[in-house]
Amino acid sequence: MIEAVPAHRLARGVRLHRSGEGATLLVPEGIVELSDSAAAILELVDGRRDEAAIAQLLAERFEAPVDDLARDVAELLAALVERGFVRC
Amino acid sequence: MLTPANPRSLLCELTYRCNLQCPYCYNPLDLGSSRDELDADAWLRVIDEAAALGVVQFGFSGGEPTLRRDLLVRAIARVTELGGYANLITQGTFLDEAYLAELLAAGLAHVQISIQAPGAELAAIIAGTDVHERKLAALRMIAEHDVALTLNCVLHRLNHDTLADVLAFAEREGIRRLELANVQFYGWAYKNRGALMPTREQVRRGAVLVAEASERLRGRMDITYVLPDYFEELPKPCMHGWGQLALTVTPDGRILPCPAAAAIATLRFPNVRDTSLDRAWHDSDAFTAYRGTDWMPDPCRSCDRREIDWGGCRCQAFLLTGNAAATDPACAKSPDHALVQAFRDAPAEPAFVPRRPSPVEKVRA
């Protein structure tokens, strides 16, 4: 049996921003600097893909082990959920 | 001389006009004349210059910024067009569906709306007018839309004991972001400090209530509790350093390193009517005066927290000592720390002066 896995999305008023100086997350009255890998993960957060789907896509793009990426994705999203910048 | 990084945030104070009269307002006592307000073209130029300097966070505040409707909508649209992030800091009483729809279509990302107290009666005493229900209607309307929403309540002696009710109200309303800021003493709040200073017991109990609620609501509600620095041993790192990240433009065009800086009578501030944001940021005496650490006296100069606290708040140093280059008296190491203790422990005053253009009268709370 397949369980429904929640898909993440950026919270209201949270925007991924790219400029010459790198990627940031623009949040209410604040700026969160993002590493390249965090930005790559957040670009795939769209309210439909679940964590496994995001990790799979990144594994294909970067030719990296999917288990490692799944751990990175889970860690980043959990931290951002805690801060209220990502919802699931 | 230190070469500053570029600013990342700009606060646009569109007007000092407001239909509320909150005694804790940080706006200057001299609310000036609305005839001196910058026009829309000047504001759009300010936004363009700020974006070119590297600003991505734009705040629209006042006074009550929604009083300048056409300007506000155009300004937010320009911010959006330039890839920036638009925050609106409002008391909400002028917002209706049509106005909100215009703001959202322009790209507004975040609204911070304030209440004065959880109940209408106390809120009316503090605001000097009975608008609590209109604020709640605005809050509920905004919550229906795709925009970030922060509920803000400034805490002081008159409403501190209702903090548990503010938390319960926010939870009932499904608020995701709650800001509980103890009053900071600038402008009208400084004038009214005798009536507004919370008691030590209020501050302590507030911290306990907020810690408990933050734990229980983790992941559902993000709560910020801003401690009053008068009750701490360390100063707040004002603006993360003078002229390092942020700037403010006042309704009449003055360019300030911090929203309260106009109180520093010993500085002359540049004005967007005469100069560019770029020149003000890099070259003006007002912005270079306290940038970095070279200006610091001891105990700041030799303190290992000098690039953490940045000497504390210049405005507070000026208000309490008359010298904006003094160590912030909120710091326990300041030779003037006794001023803060005296200020904090002074007997409570039973009345405050409502924020309004002069003449003023006192209101018993």
Image (spheres, grey):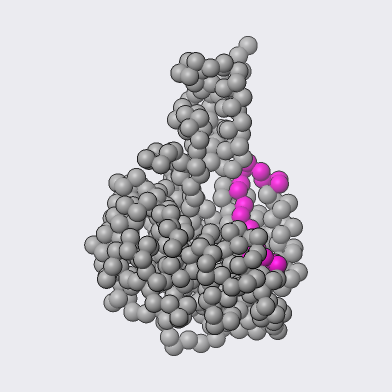
Q: Residue at x 74, y 64 (%)?
A: B204
Specify whether B13 is left or right of B186. left
Q: Position of residue B10 (x, y in %)?
A: 40, 58
Specify whether B352 is left or right of B264. right
Q: Hey, which residue is sitting farthest top in the picture?
A: A1
Whether B219 is among the magenta residues is yes
Q: Is residue B89 visible?
A: no
Specify whether B67 is left or right of A33. left
Q: Quadrant of the N terminus of chain B?
A: bottom left
Whether B21 is among the magenta residues is no
Q: Hey, which residue is sitting farthest left in the picture?
A: B41
Q: Residue at x 58, y 81 (%)?
A: B321
Which quarter of the figure has residue A6? top right
Q: Residue at x 53, y 41 (%)?
A: A85
Q: Quadrant of the C terminus of chain B?
A: bottom right
Q: Is residue B341 visible?
A: yes
**Front in this rendered view, residue B186 or B93:** B186
**Front in this rendered view, residue A50 or B298:** B298
Q: Position of residue B81 (x, y in %)?
A: 30, 46
Q: Position of residue B262 (x, y in %)?
A: 44, 75
Q: Give the residues in magenta.
A: B215-235
Q: Residue at x 58, y 54 (%)?
A: B178
